[in-house]
Structure formats: C-alpha cells, structure tokens
Amino acid sequence: MNLGRLNHVGVATPSIEASIALYRDVLGATAIGEPFDLPAQGVRVCFVDTPNTQIELIEPLGDASPTRAFLEKNPAGGQHHLCYEVPDIHAAKAWFEGKGARVLGEPRIGAHGTPIFFVHPRDMGGVLTEIMETPKEAH
Ligand code: CO
C-alpha cells in the first residue's frame, strides 16, 4: 500500500460554533462549510478548508458519542486524528491487519461520503489514524 494525501486533521471541540469563530476570526479561514450531523458516528462535523488540506471540527452528538471521552480528558478540545486517503478501502484494511495493526470496526461511510475506518492509536505511534477511500471525482 502507498500512503495517499493527508485529507484532513480531525480536531475535537466542545462547541463547533465557537471553533468556527476561532478559525474565521483568529486564524483567518475563509472557506468554512456548514456543520452537519453524522449520527452513525455520534458526531457533528464542520470542514474548514485550507490551501493544502482540511480541518474537520468534530463535536459530540448524543450521549454515547466516542468523542465525549476525548473531551473529558481534553475539555478545551484538541487534535483528535489524522486522515489519509487510499485508493481502495478494503485493500487498505487487509494491509493494516496484515501488519498487525488493529482496525476499529468495518469500513463505513464517513463525513466525505466515502468509506473510512480508524486504526488504533496504540498501533500508530499514538496517533488515532483514519483511512479514507479517495472520492471518485478526485481521481
Ligand atoms: Co475524520
């Protein structure tokens, strides 16, 4: 497997609205999407475009959201995951499993509408790693 482009950096936040204000008013971001709910993953998401990648703001959605535990340890929010693109999600899953890395669950549709999975941070040098199939229109 060849590692693809960095698609986005996931940043957890207790308030997407407050983070949008930070990225717009302090960091100077000019391309900020509309926040949307991703109930299957227990998160509310908003993408901030930068010239070479995106920031994915993630706020917990619902009591069972896995992002809640992160915010309990990091109440102000913080860097949550890195997401890399691959051409074939199933080939990538087999690759990581063949390397002994723990893939968390089956591939599922992520915030960009393409299949994703996460790899356990303990097998990724401490970084929660999202692997995402490259959107077809980007080929
Ligand atoms: Co992500």
Image (cartoon, rainbow, N blue to C red):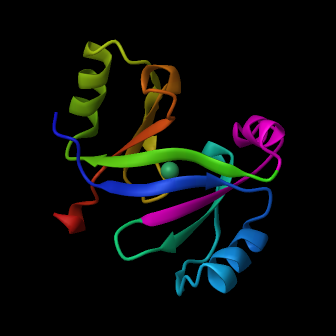
Count every numbered label the image shows and give the total.
Answer: 0
**Residue 42: horizontal and vertical position, in percent?**
68, 45
Q: Residue at coordinates 51% horizontally, 27% vertically from top-left?
A: 121
Does 56 appear in magenta?
yes
Where the N terminus falls, by quadrant? top left
The front one of 109 and 58 is 58
**Residue 19: horizontal and vertical position, in percent?**
71, 69
**Residue 14: horizontal and vertical position, in percent?**
80, 56
Q: Which residues are magenta?
A: 54-75
The front one of 37 and 95 is 95
In the figure, residue 74 lies in which quadrant?
top right
Q: Residue at coordinates 45% horizontally, 26% vertically from top-left?
A: 125
**Residue 105: horizontal and vertical position, in percent?**
49, 26
Where the C terminus falls, by quadrant? bottom left
Left or right relative to 89: residue 128:
right
Depicted 138 relative to depicted 3: above or below: below
Q: Residue at coordinates 25% horizontally, 14% vertically from top-left?
A: 98
The front one of 39 and 69 is 69
Left or right relative to 24: residue 122:
left
Does 24 appear in magenta?
no
Q: Residue furthest front?
A: 26
In the figure, residue 35 lies in which quadrant?
bottom right
Q: Residue at coordinates 78% horizontally, 72% vertically from top-left?
A: 18
In the figure, residue 99 lies in which quadrant?
top left
Left or right relative to 66: residue 113:
left
